[in-house]
Each structure stands twice: as C-alpha cells, then as structure tokens.
Image (cartoon, grey):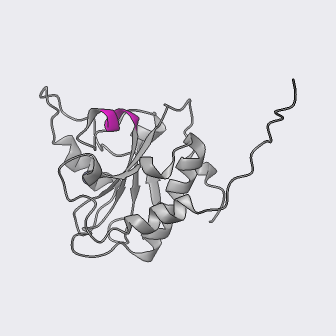
Amino acid sequence: MEDDGIEFEPPGNSLEWKYLVLHHSATEGGSVESVDAGHRERKDQFGNPWRGIGYHFVIGNGDGMPDGQIESTFRWKEQLHGAHAGSRQHNRRGVGICLIGNFEETAPTPRQIAAVKRLCEWLSDRYGISGERVLRHLDVAATKCPGRLFPYEELIDELENRPLAVTAEVDHDAF
Ligand SMILES: [Zn+2]
C-alpha cells in the first residue's frame, strides 16, 4: 500500500516538530505493545511512572510485528512530547522513531530500511525538517542507539538528495 503517507497525519492539531530521533529497540523482536509494557515500568526523574511507550512510531521486523510495518503510538495520535531521547529539547521537539531489532548485532531488514526512509521523508516534508535535524539517539545522548549497523548516512543522503518538492513561485517584482 504505497501512497503519499497521508495515514501518518495526526487526527488533531500538530505540535511544532523540529527533529526526528532514530532508535533501535535493542531487542531481537518486539511490537508497540511489548515496548509499551517495558516503558510502563520506568520512572522519570521525579519518580513518576512513564505514561507508556516513549516513542511516536515503531517499525516492525517480522518478529512480533509485520516486517516493515509502521505503527504510530498514542504519543503521536495525541501529539504528546516523547520520552526517548535523554535530552529535554529532543523529547519536546523530536519525533521518536524506534525500529525493532538490535542493530549492534544485525542490520535492519530491507523492508525496515524502506519504511524508515518513507516515514522520515513524509515527516521532513510535513514539518520542514532538514537532514541535519534528522538525528540518531547517539547524536543527543551517551548511547550506542540505534546501533552501528543502522544505515544512517544512506538515509540522510537519500533525504537530502531527493528531487525538490514543487513549491509556489514567489513573485519578487510584485511591488
Ligand atoms: Zn534510543
């Protein structure tokens, strides 16, 4: 079902997203439900339990969720700040995207790579997020996430070198 990605549009008003932050689950398999269950056991710096899965999107790898399936979470549907980056600025303004798998050990599947590119392209276009604001978790916090086998350079290269979207011409001679 390849289309223009309109299914990602949140039902209500959007927050002002400025970053995309990429993660792996660091588990062999998983799903929105399994990550949600794990995150509910965590507490924030004030000792309050997390409200559930800290990411906005999860991309399955065929073990727990269909390979390459993109699923949005309650944080995206309700347009809530994330709990994923270990950086206040990036939690508030960053869309958290988690690919299931441990990319220190195995590479993402081809379908996951295609899915994350498609999702990042849509989010970049929708919120005007340029390539230098598409970050790995390790770019904003002390972590190996999303793992050494995550094809980050390839993703950024494709994002930055895609044909420009057609935009309205500004008439500079209007006055
Ligand atoms: Zn991470």
Q: Is residue 49 above or below residue 155?
A: above
Q: Position of residue 158 (x, y in %)?
A: 53, 65
144 shown above or below 53: below
Relative to 156, 44 lies left or right: left
Q: Residue at x 40, y 66 (%)?
A: 153
**Residue 172 visible:** yes
The answer, for residue 69, to whether it is visible in the render is no
Give the residue displayed 27% in from the left and 55% down from the top: 34
Residue that extends furthest to the top in the rendered view of this protein: 175
Q: Which residues are magenta?
A: 89-93
Number of numbered discs visible in the structure rendering? 0
Which of the image's four quarters has the C terminus? Answer: top right
Q: Nearer the viewer, residue 35 or 151?
A: 151
> In the image, 170: left or right of 110?
right
In the picture, residue 22 is in which quadrant? bottom left
Asked whether residue 11 is drawn in magenta, I would say no
- The quadrant of the rendering that contains the N terminus is bottom right
Q: Is residue 6 left or right of residue 79?
A: right
User: As rendered, which of 148 and 64 lies closer to the eye?
Assistant: 148
Residue 43's x, y, as percent?
Answer: 15, 35
Magenta-colored segment: predominant secondary structure:
helix
Residue 90 forms part of the magenta stretch: yes
Query: What residue is at 47 percent from the left and 58 percent from the top?
Result: 70
Residue 69: horizontal and vertical position, in percent?
46, 63
Q: Which residue lies at the image location 53% right of the left edge and 59% below the top edge?
A: 159
46, above or below 33, in the image: above
Q: Residue 172: x percent and y percent?
A: 81, 33
